[in-house]
Image (spheres, rainbow, N blue to C red):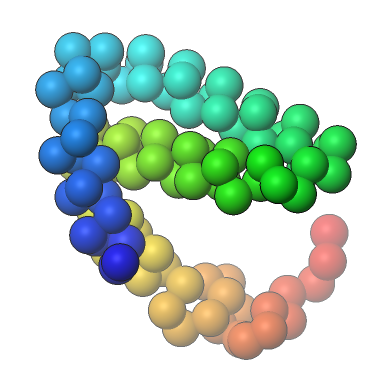
Amino acid sequence: MTIDEFQGLIEKIYHERDMARGVSGTFMWFVEEVGELARALQRGELDNLHEEFADVFAWMATLASLSGVRLAEAVDKYAEGCPVCHEVPCDCPIK
């Protein structure tokens, strides 16, 4: 499945609910899912990571849709490598 197909699927499944909730309410759900992913990473819960990564990606797709952003286009920022130095791997000084 491509990124655009995934975003379209999430729209088909949840768009009406997401529109009713709005960007602010949806962002709160997204942050909660990021927290669940953080806990799974911190605890080393490898069996739970697939689910948590999927949830974070789904909520990010929802936020993008509500904001009029196509994720497949947004990721083009990295198509040429690092967006700052344009190298692969990045050759920017570590801060």
Which sits in the foreground, 36 or 77? Answer: 36
Residue 61 percent across, percent down from the top left: 34, 43
> Image height check: is 92 above or below 52?
below
Please name the residue shown 49% across and 46% down the image: 54
Q: Is 88 positioned to the left or the right of 13 in the image?
A: right
> Image height check: is 79 above or below 46?
below
Residue 60 shows in this picture: no
> Image height check: is 21 above or below 6?
above
Q: Is 21 positioned to the left or the right of 39 in the image?
A: left
Residue 11 percent across, percent down from the top left: 19, 39
Q: Is 35 positioned to the left or the right of 58 in the image?
A: right
Residue 63 shows in this picture: yes
Quadrant occupied by the N terminus: bottom left
User: On the image, which quarter does residue 33 sit in?
Assistant: top right
Q: Is 16 positioned to the left or the right of 31 in the image?
A: left
Residue 13 percent across, percent down from the top left: 20, 35
Please name the residue shown 71% across and 47% down the image: 47
Please name the residue shown 46% across and 20% down the image: 29
Which sits in the foreground, 24 or 87? Answer: 24
> Image height check: is 90 above or below 30?
below
Please name the residue shown 60% across and 32% down the image: 34
User: On the image, which quarter does residue 6 sit in?
Assistant: bottom left
Question: Outermost residue toward the front?
Answer: 47
Residue 77 percent across, percent down from the top left: 41, 68
Quadrant occupied by the C terminus: bottom right
